[in-house]
Image (tube, rainbow, N blue to C red):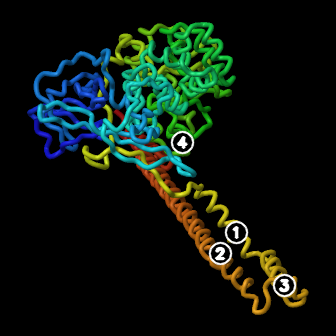
Amino acid sequence: MSVSQINRVFIARLAGTAVFDPNGDPVGKVRDAVATLRSNNQPPRILGLVVEVPLRRRVFVPITRVTSIESGAVVITGLVNMRRFESRAGELLVLGELLDRSINLNESGESVVVEDMGMEQTRTGDWFINRVHIMKKGSGLRRKGATSTVQWEEVTGFALPEHNQGVTNLLSTISNLRAADLAAVIQDLAPKRRVEVARALDDERLADVLQEMDEAERVALLAELEGERAADVLGEMDPDDAADLLREVGEEKAQVLIDLMEPEDAEDVLRLMTYEDYSAGGMMTTEPIVMSADYSVADALASVRAREVSPALASQVFVCRQPLETPTGRYIGMVHYQRLLREPPATLLGSIVDTNTQGVNPDASLHAVSSYLASYNLLSLPVIDANDRLLGAVTVDDVLDHLLPDNWRHDHRDSAATMARNHGLDTPRETRRSLRANYDPEAFGRLSEKFARFLGTARFLVYMTVFVLSWVIWNALAPQSARFDEYPFIFLTLILSLQASYAAPLILLAQNRQADRDRITLNEDRAQNSRSIADTEYLTRELASLRIALGDVATRDYLRNELGDMAKEIVEELRKSESNPE
């Protein structure tokens, strides 16, 4: 096996590396390594690599099939078994199960944390983990201690079960993954590690991951979370996904979680749970973009640009009467995103609303909803009740989620984004540590502006004058024993110099912040002027087209002249006929 001058490979660095066949065609990406522990604290043997191939399927590639490992590429030979990888008894995922473990140094007995693990190839061609990159616990004000790389024989504790294993290094390895890819990674972990990773994620991130997981796995994971945390995560999920998940956990558990949720979130979820799962009401979301007819195109585009709005919901703006919260007032119609881009910003939605799309009722079947979307090329479809009120919207991704088979998330997984690597494979990956103090630049900037403004007020001059005079009078007239800064008042001079030395950069910082605000205001004014010019040009073109159109319209003077000429011709004909009777 050619290792291209890399005789040691750290596995956390290897994660995300592209895998190629001998012809140079891409196969997938490395996601983990499989190892097995040996007796007498001998270095673990690497059995193979977990490779993620297209359609997000994770397969096992024996280490004997690996012919070359380079920085940025792993080359394999032979056929790849496309059966989904499942860990067997005695096998361990290096990144998923061994990172962040607390182990002990043999020499001192000190407890350390595993940050990375390095594997080396022997003369026989076998790969063993013989290097462990560790981090000692911090002391004093330092939260993180020193790091070092030690031999496998210098540490113990990998064979012992650990109940509260950390996830810092594992999360740093998978932090760049999208929610669907992160869900695939979590599903491949052992149940204990799966729960530990879920508890370390924030509510919004965990909600996105749960929405991408299989039903059985996400129900089991939700059951491991504490009641308050589970309710918070459900509140961050889309109402339709939260309703689907609560249907799966059982009525008793669902009622407990609903009671712990925020009233507004719980109301939407309860309303969705009253519909059948495969009906329009069961698939819809209660949070589409809803506006009244007197809103402008600019208001609609501002709502569409919101980060939390999904692309499917951003494709249409629904126009209704007040109230605008679902269930709304009478549904009027919708405005497509493309139409919004063609109209001037000041145009009212009522003048461009599409009233032909009437939507479906909440009891419509999955077939009816999918047929409607396909027939009219829509990304979302309004759900209307018998009183013409908008209840929500069914998006195309919700329809696909119900149309695909139950195990589609296993069978359809595309490759994840490439993870960033700043060093070679032969150096361990370390968590970043910074000695810089953490502070809020915005708060410090506001403080500097307040200080600069205060220096320019009469109050500051009065305070400073009173302070200096009091200092001088006290040290000049007070008893000798009570004086602390006699003439020439060196201590007072030092204080004033220190105050001046701090005042100058603070005033400069305030000026820079004001200059930045002025620059932003100037850019906004320029953008506003550009929009005004564009609107003016649009009106000019419209007026020109109207003038051209009016040029071909018969005017009153034109009709008078034509009618006068016709009258003259008739009179002439009559005179000729009278003068020349038959």
Instruction: State whether residue 558 is above or below residue 235.
Output: below
Read off the residue under disc 2: 503
Q: CA distance from mark 1 to mark 2?
A: 8 Å
Residue 483 bears which disc, if any? 3
Closer to us: 447 or 135: 135
Tell which circle, 1 or 4, labels the residue nearer the N-terminal end.
Answer: 4
Q: Residue lying at the far front in this picture: please name it.
A: 107
Q: Would you call the spot at circle 1 few (<14 residues within 10 Å), some (14-19), or many (20 or more)?
A: some
Q: CA distance from mark 4 to mark 2?
A: 42 Å
Q: Residue lying at the far left in this picture: please name it.
A: 23
Residue 451 bears which disc, if any? 1
Residue 302 bears which disc, if any? 4
Q: Mark 2 and mark 1 in contact (Cβ < 8 Å)?
A: yes
Q: CA distance from mark 3 to mark 1?
A: 31 Å
Tell which circle, 1 or 2, labels the residue nearer the N-terminal end.
Answer: 1
Secondary element type, mark 2: helix
Secondary element type, mark 3: loop
Tell which circle, 3 or 4, labels the residue nearer the N-terminal end.
Answer: 4
Residue 466 bears which disc, if any? none
